Image (cartoon, helix red, strand yellow):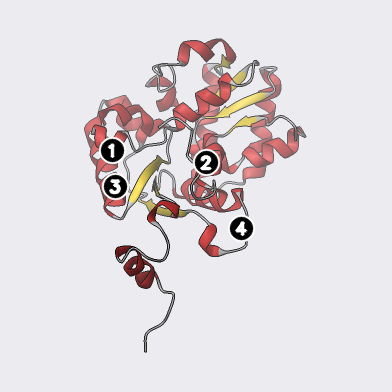
Amino acid sequence: MRVQGTCSDRDESRKRGTGVKEGNVAEIWGIVGGMGPLASAAFVRTVYESRRHARDQDYPRVILWSDPSYPDRTECLRRGDTERLVACMRLDAERLTAMGAARLVICCVTAHAVLPMLPAAIAERVLSLVDVAIAAIDEVAESHLMLCTEGCRDADVFQRHARWAAVADRVVWPEPGDHAAVHRLICALKSGASPARHAAQVCRLLDRYRVRRCVAACTELHLVTDAVERMRGRPSLRACVDPLRIAAAAIAEPVGVVHALPA
């Protein structure tokens, strides 16, 4: 006995030119995750919480490839060992595209240092979190405290961006001691530390540098941005530029909506 309405039925109906039209089906998004695993898992949850639907079928199609065996990105960049990082990212991106992913999100901001080294056929599919962050900074005419890994800062991941000059005067970098503390905070979040406790640390940094907004320029910080904003009491103007939250909202757009964020 054949069960009606299965995925295979849907695929067959497309081949016959009947049923659901190809143009009305949401593209598949692939997430290169595991850097770290808690952040990329939280990102998938954020995608599905960004827009509520009455039916399962109306939610976006997402494939998470979570591989925590990636080498440490900061250490790779410090040693100049970019080939290994590029090889891992290329392999996972190819796996996701082979599974049908049309667009990709690399769920690690520091890893964007090697994005230009990926083959063009892969790079053009990536929704860059750096593009997303810089566009968000550019929308608000006030200072933003940049919170990222030491590897991200040392590799000039943001400073090498084509639009950096347009936003550089709105970015405040922590002093070396505070930057090292941010890096330790990120490592603690990777290990499952309490987001609430570390959200308080972010709030203290905002006060110390006398700014109202920060850039969550590490995907681990996605775990604390909601808590930071609750503590800051800023419902009308978000205290955190969170690239993963912005990317999640783009992915969650209804079927047929063109994604206008940078490709």
**Residue ID at (44%, 75%):** 5
Spot occupied by residue 36 in the image (x, y as percentages of width and height): 44, 45
Find residue 158 and report its image quarter.
top left
Residue type at the position of mark 1: Ile
Nearer-N-terminus badge (3/2): 3
Q: Marks 3 and 1, Cα distance to the nearest angstrom?
A: 10 Å
Nearer-N-terminus badge (1/2): 1
**Residue ID at (77%, 34%):** 233
Nearer-N-terminus badge (3/1): 3
Nearer-N-terminus badge (4/1): 4
Tell me the SS state at disc 4.
loop
Q: Which residue is mark 1?
A: 122
Spot occupied by residue 261 in the image (x, y as percentages of width and height): 48, 32
Camera-near label (3 vs 2) is 2
Residue type at the position of mark 2: Ala
Q: Quadrant of the C terminus?
A: top left
Neighbor class of circle 1 (other Cα within 10 Å; few <14, some 14-19, many 20+) is some
Camera-near label (3 vs 1) is 1
Q: Quick check: 12 above or below 79?
A: below
Q: Marks 4 and 2, Cα distance to the nearest angstrom?
A: 15 Å
Q: Which residue is mark 2?
A: 250
Spot occupied by residue 35 in the image (x, y as percentages of width and height): 41, 43
